[in-house]
Amino acid sequence: MTSPVDSSMTPQARAYETMRTQGLRFTSQRKTITEVAFGNREHFSAESLLARSRRRNPKVSRATVYRTLAFLVRAGLLRQVDLGQSSPLYDPNFAEHPRHGHFVCVDCRKIIEFHDHCLDVRESIVTKDHGFSPRRVSLQIEATCDALREKGTCPQSTRAVRPRPKK
């Protein structure tokens, strides 16, 4: 279910408008959940969204968080991503930037988003060469951060390794 609302609106405003057009009651819980979900650019789990939402509105229920997340994913405003965490994460940047990839640090689990137009061209060539039309593309690169390789420690992790000698 994609939203027929104006794509120039913010994702939060699009979420409110989509709720209205789909006949979903606009409650204070849903308002809080939506504000928190689109309130920053960081990926989040359902449980972290619940905790942050409850800090703003103690009446937010777990069930409403999960139902609202499912609605926002169906509406194309959030994307559920599996980035190797213990539970799926939600990408609040998907509505504004649907074609991006993720670097995931295997040491500290830090997530960096990136976009590369060359990858878009390559994807187009490869899919056409094989007779496919992509419906959804997901690119995730798991890597070790340069700080761990160069300095022996990752600023976000307790893991330490011996630095590689410089060439």
Image (cartoon, rainbow, N blue to C red):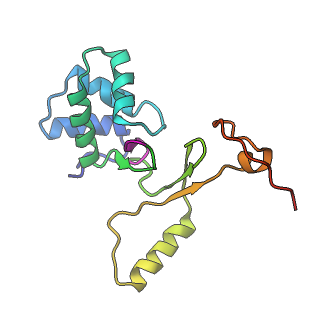
Q: Which residue reaches farthest left?
A: 23
Residue 63 is one of the magenta-drawn residues = no
Q: Position of residue 134 (x, y in %)?
A: 35, 70
- Horizontal and vertical percent position of residue 106: 58, 49
Q: Could you tell me residue 23's position as x and y percent?
A: 11, 36
Q: Residue at position x 36%, y 40% from top?
A: 11
Quarter of the picture holding the C terminus = bottom right
Quarter where residue 54 is shown: top left
Left/right placement of residue 158 relative to residue 25 reads right
Q: Nearer the viewer, residue 132 or 157?
A: 157
Q: What residue is drawn where x is 26% and y is 45%?
A: 5
Secondary structure, magenta segment, majority class: loop
Q: With respect to residue 49, does 135 lie above or below?
A: below
Question: Is 89 part of what is drawn in magenta?
Answer: yes
Q: Position of residue 41 (x, y in %)?
A: 48, 37
7 above or below 126? above
Magenta span of residues? 86-94
Closer-to-camera residue (137/27): 137
